[in-house]
Image (tube, rainbow, N blue to C red):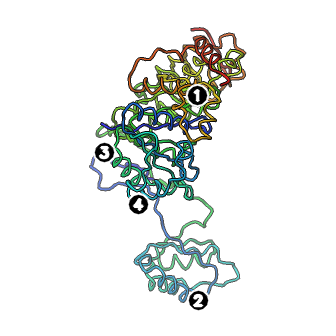
Amino acid sequence: MAKILVVTSGKGGVGKTTTSAAIGTGLALRGHKTVIVDFDVGLRNLDLIMGCERRVVYDFVNVVNGEANLQQALIKDKRLENLYVLAASQTRDKDALTQEGVEKVLMELKKDFEYVICDSPAGIEKGAHLAMYFADEAIVVTNPEVSSVRDSDRMLGILSSKSRRSENGEEPIKEHLLITRYHPERVEKGEMLSIDDVTDILAIKLKGVIPESQAVLKASNQGIPVILDDQSDAGQAYSDTVDRLLGKEKPLRFIEVPKQGFFARLFGGK
Amino acid sequence: MQTMSLNQTPDTASVFQLKGSMLAITVLELARNDLEALDRQLAAKVAQAPNFFSNTPLVLALDKLPASEGAIDLPGLMRICRHHGLRTLAIRANRIEDIAAAIAIDLPVLPPSGARERPLEPEPEVKQPEPAPAPAPAVEPQVRPTRIITAPVRGGQQIYAQGGDLVVTGSVSPGAELLADGNIHVYGAMRGRALAGIKGNTKARIFCQQMTAEMVSIAGQYKVCEDLRRDPLWGSGVQVSLSGDVLNITRL
């Protein structure tokens, strides 16, 4: 049974696209046929992070509007057999998406893929709404700072009340928390919220903590999902996260602050 | 909107009922005493909205006519109106000649505009044995069951327990708002806003296990986080009650 996963946050710049690319790639690495869909119409970035920006011909909006079929628009990853990208349009805006159109595309993708990862735009407007509306699971990406936590909290409220599952009275969207850009030293100095502070407010299951890392920026600029950099702290943290999403009981090395601090110090600055 | 008054003689079953009612009635306010122009302009209006002018009940308002306009040909005016589908029920007038003209043709006269109609109820308040206890529109019991929320209340969500109490078993996030006509109970961490007794019930209370609210309010009297933080009970289990216009926070 194919699953639709939305990567969302409310706030911008927290690492949704980085996470979508990493998680999608991680799932494909583990043998699951996966497609990552960029819902950020007008501000498309996923293709850059995935390193396929030069091969975008048709995009999501073209498919929604029936100007191209899915096979034409899906971009196959050069590194992994099981990985595809559906790019957003750069020239249109979010109003180009319709609920019916998105539903049609997602249902078609569900037939071919095991995982459909929806990379949500920031905000809580139409684009973000459509990205999460059909989801079965949600990865809520949060930075350890108050405004990001508040926005994630708002997004969780929307996930539980405005999705198709909630409107049909079905089992609610399964919510996973992912804390990104975590900086153990700054937490110790009290400049950043701790994991406990965040999980206390959001009260959903923590699936991973990604440390603030040079590797992420480097990977983005090179168009290589950071999870493929298995020497990096962030890459390993994403790997653990994918395993946990697949139900593995990974040792919770990123959940506890002291261990997290130790880990980050060990790999920090690379 | 309708008011009803029963008027029954004690011995016989009543043949009629008098009912007060408010009806929407078209008023034709005459500005000038120029019947030919009126005829032309009405004809134009009828052409625009033929459906509107078919046996439409009408009150002729002559009270805005300047005294200098001279006596009006009331039967002539009514003929013109009738011709265009307007049926005159009464006139509204204050000039004595208009009132006389109306009385002459047995047409009711209403008080001039601005004088709001007073209840003119021919109601001799006779004490009488109630024939049958009229199914009085009894005041419905206002108590509704307590509303219970088991999921966390997220920022941006608003939950209102109308007519009763609100119980939240999970936590309430900053930016969330709880509203109740009665009491509010929060068993998780309370970080949002809680407004109890919002319809003015000063007896309403707010109970929380961990009071870190952005705002608490009872019957409109409120305290915001800035004040609440200074309270030594910040973060502990408290109840909030209202005495006079002071919110009291006491340990649970």
Find numbered disc 3 in the image and state the secondary structure of the residue it sits on.
Answer: helix
Q: Distance between the residues labelled 2 and 4?
A: 67 Å
Q: Position of residue B51 (x, y in %)?
A: 41, 77
Q: What residue type is labelled 2?
A: Ala
The residue that disc 1 covers is A180
The residue that disc 4 covers is A68
| Near-viewer residue (A164 or A39) | A39
Kindly indicate whether the residues beneath marks 3 and 2 are on one polypeptide chain: no
Of the numbered discs 4 and 1, the one sitting upstream in the chain is 4
Find numbered disc 1 in the image and state the secondary structure of the residue it sits on.
Answer: strand
Q: Distance between the residues labelled 3 and 2?
A: 75 Å
The residue that disc 2 covers is B37
Nearer the viewer's eye, disc 2 or disc 4?
4
Q: Which amino acid does label 4 sit on?
A: Ala
Nearer the viewer's eye, disc 4 or disc 1?
4
Kindly indicate whether the residues beneath marks 2 and 4 are on one polypeptide chain: no
Estimate how packed mark 1 is, as few (under 14), some (14 to 19) or many (20 or more) residues with alpha carbons within 10 Å. Answer: many
The residue that disc 3 covers is A111
Among the 4 quarters of the image, the one containing residue B222? top right
Q: Where is residue A191 in the image (x, y as percent from the top left)?
A: 71, 21
Q: How far apart are marks 3 and 4 (CA)?
A: 18 Å
Nearer the viewer's eye, disc 3 or disc 2?
3
Of the numbered discs 3 and 4, the one sitting upstream in the chain is 4
Q: What residue type is labelled 1?
A: Thr
Q: Do the residues labelled 1 and 2 touch (CB within 8 Å)?
A: no
Estimate how packed mark 2 is, as few (under 14), some (14 to 19) or many (20 or more) residues with alpha carbons within 10 Å. Answer: few
Please give the chain letter of the residue carrying mark 2: B
Please give the chain letter of the residue carrying mark 4: A
Q: Are marks 4 and 1 in contact (CB under 8 Å)?
A: no
Residue at 48% over, 73% down: B58
Please give the chain letter of the residue carrying mark 1: A
